[in-house]
Image (spheres, rainbow, N blue to C red):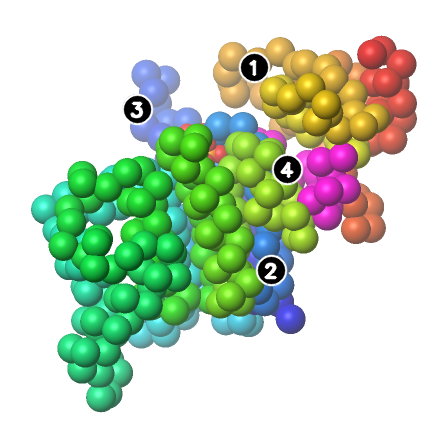
Amino acid sequence: MTMLEVKNLKRTFTTKDNMFGRREVKAVRDVSFTIPDGGVISFIGESGCGKTTIGRIVAGLETPTDGTVLLDGIDIHRANPKERRELMRQIQLIQQDPYQALNPAHTIEEALAQPLRLMAKRKAGVSNAWIQDRMAEVLSLVGLDPAAILYKYPHMLSGGQRQRVVIARALTVEPKVLVADEAVSMIDVSLRLGVLHLLRNLREKLNISVLFITHDVAASRYLGRDGKVFVIYKGMIVEEGATDTVINGPTHPYTQALLSAVPVLKGLEVPGSQRFYVEKELSQDGLSEEGCLFASRCPFATAECRRQLPPLAGDSHKSACLYPYERQVTARMLD
Ligand SMILES: Nc1ncnc2c1ncn2[C@@H]1O[C@H](COP(=O)(O)OP(=O)(O)O)[C@@H](O)[C@H]1O
Ligand SMILES: [Mg+2]
């Protein structure tokens, strides 16, 4: 069953801070995807490709220019205010910086009690004891000892503990979907795996659907192993498929370049993968609206690529490249 369905999402920002006046940024061009009930998908792509914008729209914190976000079949952006509040409870966003997400003047107990008191207002028969029990329960779920942590302030915790508290707070309201936007990027490497492991366990235990946003291929592979990967480039999906299929055999030159840039430990290389690099683009200005958005950086682009935007094509493994397979063969020959 599908928990979340996103159809033809678009978001254009108009900025006025430019000396030439208004400038339009197409942060999200046309993005569609689904997350099954209890399933996981990950978005990978470099900075500025629109990942956060998609995550915020899915969480109801940003409005789309066009397109729909359906949670369990209900359009979250067209629901009435009361319905919308309830829908927003069901989709929780976990952001990159766990320190910013917590009020430094509040203890962990206060941070967790706040959403629970709001819930208690709406539910009948909820007592203080229930709030205490629920706090202990969510903290145990994220691997923290309630007695040792409830009285503490955010600055007294490690980055990993803080992110666990943020996740615990999201769990207090029993969400159906978690959007984790670079949720482990700012955490010390030694603690990162623990938080990823936690997110994976929560999916299994609570049957929560997860949208995992990252620029870290290894993290998406770890958390999203049994799900799908979507590779985003300039607000478009350029490749999608089962996580292992895409990571082991990327067919879009952008994905190939992205995977090439990942430092790989000797002995852990993906067999048969090509390694090539693309130039970093200096600006998004002068971007051709006609052909493939990657053409200006692609080592294999032809005149045809600059003429038309390739559609995302394929069965379960899709690629928005005119000749994905041929390109791969060519890349191998160049290696
Ligand atoms: N509120 C905003 N106003 C104007 N431009 C924005 C806004 N939010 C994002 N953008 C622009 O949209 C593009 C995508 O940004 P973002 O979604 O944050 O990408 P990512 O998370 O992949 O780094 C960027 O060019 C960014 O500058
Ligand atoms: Mg981002």
Quarter holding the N terminus is bottom right
- Select label 3 or label 1 by which is in front: 1
In the picture of the structure, the residue carrying the numbered disc 1 is 281
- The residue shown at (51%, 37%) is 214
Q: Position of residue 168 (x, y in %)?
A: 33, 58
The Cα–Cα distance between marks 2 and 3, rounded to whole angstroms, is: 41 Å
Lower sequence index among marks 2 and 3: 3
Residue tagged by mark 3? 17
Q: Which badge, 4 or 1, is on the more N-terminal residue?
A: 4
Residue 229 at least partly seen: yes
**Residue 333 spot, x, y in % from top left:** 89, 14
Badge 4 residue CB within 8 Å of ligand 1: no
Q: Which residue is outermost to the bottom?
A: 125
Of residues 127 and 123, the one drawn nearer to the viewer in this rendering: 127
Q: CA distance from mark 4 to mark 2?
A: 17 Å
**How far is disc 3 from disc 1 in space, using C-alphas?**
22 Å
Pointer 2: what residue?
Answer: 39
Of the two numbered discs 3 and 1 on the same chain, state the one appearing first in sequence. 3
**Left or right of 64, for residue 297:** right
Q: Earlier in the sequence, mark 2 or mark 1?
A: 2
- Within 10 Å of disc 3 (Cα), the crowding (few <14, some 14-19, many 20+) is few
Q: Position of residue 53 (x, y in %)?
A: 44, 42
* Image height of 278 relative to 21, above or below: above
The residue carrying pointer 1 sits among few (fewer than 14), some (14 to 19) or many (20 or more) residues within 10 Å by Cα, namely: few
Range drawn in magenta: 231-248
- The reply to whether the magenta stretch includes residue 181 is no
Secondary structure beneath disc 1? loop
Pinpoint residue 62: horizontal percent, then vertical percent.
38, 50
CA distance for labels 4 and 1: 18 Å
